[in-house]
């Protein structure tokens, strides 16, 4: 017996030319293979791929993005070669294309881009023509008119089901019945019993429902695709000669200088080295007002410059910018399915074969056992097949999840998958870090205490003059307060740093000094009254800078990590949303922690904690409340973030590690995004539940009508089409959240 030759596996390249599987490159990383699967737009194709791929790599290694027809295979834990993966995909009957970041629309013909629309339009027109011929010849018995009408109906059926037939055949040969097979059987069954008009109507309505569904899903896809448009196509690169040149952002190296004109989008992440301007960062952080940027501050690709001219030194390559990371994260998030999506998929896998069996029983049992008319019960079986198609149920949930992801990204909240879209809706307790989360995370002037005839303005000017050249955080906080009040600083002459203690210098001809409480004690200028005041402030966690001269103490400045202005309202809002317990976890001293907690309305404080202590505190909360969020800076709080049900990173725009660590990243330093996230999650879950209940209710009603003989083929498909459109439209409401 001659050995059967193995088929040569071919893949389409970006120019739609075939090449051997061994020659194609699909690796997005060392362990991941990514493909665009042509025709993968419903759960049935996913099931076909799983049947071939799960035995090779396991289900956990597969990621499916139905909206982009994308398959990701993680081969890191398996010794599976790309050729074996390619062979498995080929066995499923689907065509794989190496994944490209650029959509292949530009290379597609008019027919390829608009095939579904043209076929649907032809189906509708042909069916209408057949109906008109049949109606006009009602009083005639001419066979030619009947044949002509049926010819138009046949054209309507073929064009309406043109994109369904291949899937139905694949479903039949693989012995996995799906909605395409159900619909094909229903349409041809109608023609066999002489109901050509109903068959053509079903074919047109089904094609129309898929067309409108494709358009609706495209809206969700476009919402994410718009992120790609945030980055400008060209960067204005400054050359060594001082001239500028327009180049692609991908050509710009780290350390290069780009010129950002007023109104321009920033092409790359970088640091301002010249100029000052306000930057609209809404696309990255979700902040509603522009942020002032000056020399030394960082800016991000995709943001929009205000009215100032900036020179920016690039700090990242185009593929590593914060915007690029967000786009990758949102794309990857679609393949991390939510529990509701997995439930729907499992339900559909049982539901579809059950419907096929039920239709067969309806066809056979009444005629055989009860003397029913075969044609009547055959028709009812066809109606059941049509109404039972689960596509409305299957597609509604992923559309809702992706719409929720896209909406959150537009608001500066990066969610890493469907699982984490749902999780905030179930939260019962929240743990928060103090520094950088409830507070600003940097010192600021909180109290001025002038003494011996000096006022607040004099005290600040003396301290600012001595601190204006220092890089110490306390010094910068004092200088910042001076600038905020619009005061002008004199030059401190004969300036001298007192190592580890403070500084001194001559201001307007007189010697002044500043330093710590300890330095004041060393100088012997402390009085009992001053000592008592300083001890009281220090016990509350304040840092003290004392200012004086050789004659007396001019006063002192208390600095502290100030509470975010939105923190009290945010904590109150979380309580109103039903969060049972809000706990602050901090490594700071107990006195400071208690003061902050009391100011913002925190329920419980755990202070002086090491990272391991925070993990234990979160674990205790999880054991008691089940669903717990940990909110921190994403780096030093990483163990606690990982232990919580969901980890939420604050201010992730400044930290790559935050995006990697957390399940959800708040791209701006806005704690108020947390209540918004909870409401958004609950709204998403409400819409998903509405879609599931509505889809099942419509089907249940028409199944009952089918058994009662009160429904028709066209009525069933119209109801199914309407249900599909309504649940998809309902899911897309999340884009306006």
Image (cartoon, grey):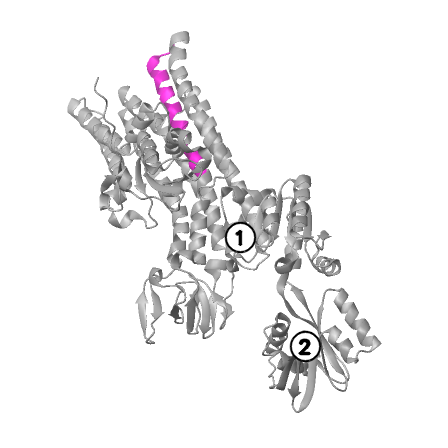
- In this figure, which residue is indicated by the disc labeled 2? 502
Binning the other alpha carbons within 10 Å of mark 2 as few (below 14), some (14 to 19) or many (20 upward) gives some
- Seen as rendered, the residue at the extreme front is 499
Q: Would residue 719 be visible to someone looking at this image?
A: no
Please say whether residue 507 is one of the residues in the magenta stretch: no
**Residue 10, quarter of the rendered image:** top left
Residue 552's place in the image compared with 255, above or below, is below
The CA distance from mark 1 to mark 2 is 40 Å
Residue 661's place in the image compared with 532, above or below, is above
- State which region is magenta: 371-396
- In this figure, which residue is indicated by the disc labeled 1? 665
Residue 187 in the image, given as x and y percentages of width and height: 30, 26
Left or right: residue 50 versus residue 414 is left
**Residue 588, quarter of the rendered image:** bottom right
Q: Secondary structure at mark 1?
A: strand
Depth order, front residue of 675/614 = 614
Please say whether residue 380 is one of the residues in the magenta stretch: yes
Depth order, front residue of 71/54 = 54
């Amino acid at each position: 017996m001659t050995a059967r030759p193995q088929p040569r596996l071919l893949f389409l390249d970006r120019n739609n030319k075939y090449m051997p599987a061994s020659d194609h490159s699909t690796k997005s990383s060392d362990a991941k293979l990514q493909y665009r699967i042509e025709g993968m737009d419903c759960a049935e194709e996913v099931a076909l791929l799983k049947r071939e791929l799960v035995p090779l790599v396991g289900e956990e290694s597969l990621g499916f993005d139905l909206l982009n027809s994308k398959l990701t295979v993680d081969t890191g834990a398996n010794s599976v070669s790309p050729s074996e993966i390619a062979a498995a995909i080929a066995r499923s009957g689907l065509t794989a294309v190496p994944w490209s970041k650029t959509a292949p629309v530009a290379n597609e013909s008019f027919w390829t881009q608009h095939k579904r629309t043209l076929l649907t339009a032809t189906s509708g027109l042909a069916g209408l023509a057949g109906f008109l011929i049949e109606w006009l010849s009602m009083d005639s018995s001419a066979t030619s008119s009947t044949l002509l009408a049926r010819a138009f109906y046949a054209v309507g059926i073929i064009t309406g089901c043109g994109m369904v037939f291949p899937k139905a055949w694949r479903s039949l040969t693989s012995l996995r019945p799906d909605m395409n097979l159900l619909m094909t059987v229903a349409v041809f069954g109608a023609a066999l019993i002489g109901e050509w008009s109903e068959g053509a109507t079903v074919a047109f309505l089904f094609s129309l429902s898929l067309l409108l569904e494709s358009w609706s899903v495209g809206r969700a896809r476009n919402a994410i695709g718009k992120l790609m448009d945030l980055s400008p196509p060209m960067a204005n690169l400054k050359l060594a000669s001082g001239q500028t040149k327009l180049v692609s952002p991908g050509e710009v190296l780290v350390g290069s200088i780009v010129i950002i004109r007023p109104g321009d989008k920033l092409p790359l992440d970088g640091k301002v080295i010249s100029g000052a301007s306000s930057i609209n960062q809404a696309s990255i952080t979700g902040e509603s007002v522009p942020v002032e940027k000056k020399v030394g501050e960082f800016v991000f690709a995709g943001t929009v410059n205000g009215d100032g001219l900036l020179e920016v030194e690039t700090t990242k390559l185009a593929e590593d910018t914060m915007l690029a990371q967000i786009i990758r994260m949102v794309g990857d998030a679609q393949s991390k399915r939510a529990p509701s999506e997995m439930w729907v998929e499992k339900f559909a896998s049982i539901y579809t074969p059950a419907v096929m069996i039920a239709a067969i029983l309806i066809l056979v049992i009444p005629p055989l056992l009860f003397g029913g008319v075969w044609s009547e019960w055959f028709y009812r079986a066809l109606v059941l097949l049509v109404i039972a198609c689960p596509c409305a149920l299957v597609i509604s949930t992923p559309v809702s999840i992706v719409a929720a992801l896209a909406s959150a990204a537009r608001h500066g909240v990066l969610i890493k998958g469907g699982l984490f879209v749902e999780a905030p809706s179930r939260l019962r307790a929240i743990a928060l870090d103090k520094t950088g989360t409830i507070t600003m995370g940097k010192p600021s002037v909180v109290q001025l205490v002038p003494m011996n005839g000096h006022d607040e303005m004099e005290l600040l000017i003396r301290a600012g003059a001595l601190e204006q050249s220092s890089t110490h955080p306390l010094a910068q906080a004092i200088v910042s307060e001076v600038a905020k009040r619009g005061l002008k600083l004199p030059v401190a002459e004969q300036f001298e740093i007192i190592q580890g203690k403070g500084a001194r210098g001559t201001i307007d001809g007189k010697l002044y000094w500043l330093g710590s409480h300890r330095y004041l004690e060393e100088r012997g200028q402390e009085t009992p009254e001053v000592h008592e005041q300083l001890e009281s402030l220090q016990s509350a966690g304040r840092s003290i800078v004392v200012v004086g001269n050789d004659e007396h103490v001019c006063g002192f400045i208390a600095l502290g990590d100030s509470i975010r202005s939105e923190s009290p309202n945010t904590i109150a809002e979380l309580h109103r949303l039903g969060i049972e317990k809000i706990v602050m976890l901090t490594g700071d001293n107990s006195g400071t922690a208690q003061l902050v907690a009391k100011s913002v309305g925190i329920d419980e404080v755990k202070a002086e904690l090491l990272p391991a202590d925070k993990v234990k505190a979160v674990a205790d909360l999880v054991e008691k409340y089940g669903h717990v969020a940990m909110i921190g800076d994403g780096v030093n709080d990483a163990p606690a973030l990982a232990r919580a049900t969901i980890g939420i990173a604050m201010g992730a725009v400044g930290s790559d590690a935050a995006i990697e660590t957390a399940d959800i990243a708040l791209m701006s330093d806005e704690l108020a995004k947390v209540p918004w996230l909870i409401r958004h999650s609950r709204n998403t879950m409400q819409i998903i539940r509405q879609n599931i209940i509505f889809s099942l209710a419509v089907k249940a009603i028409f199944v009952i009508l089918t058994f009662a003989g009160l429904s028709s083929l066209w009525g069933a498909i119209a109801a199914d089409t309407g249900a599909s459109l309504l649940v998809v439209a309902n899911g897309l409401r999340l884009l306006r959240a």
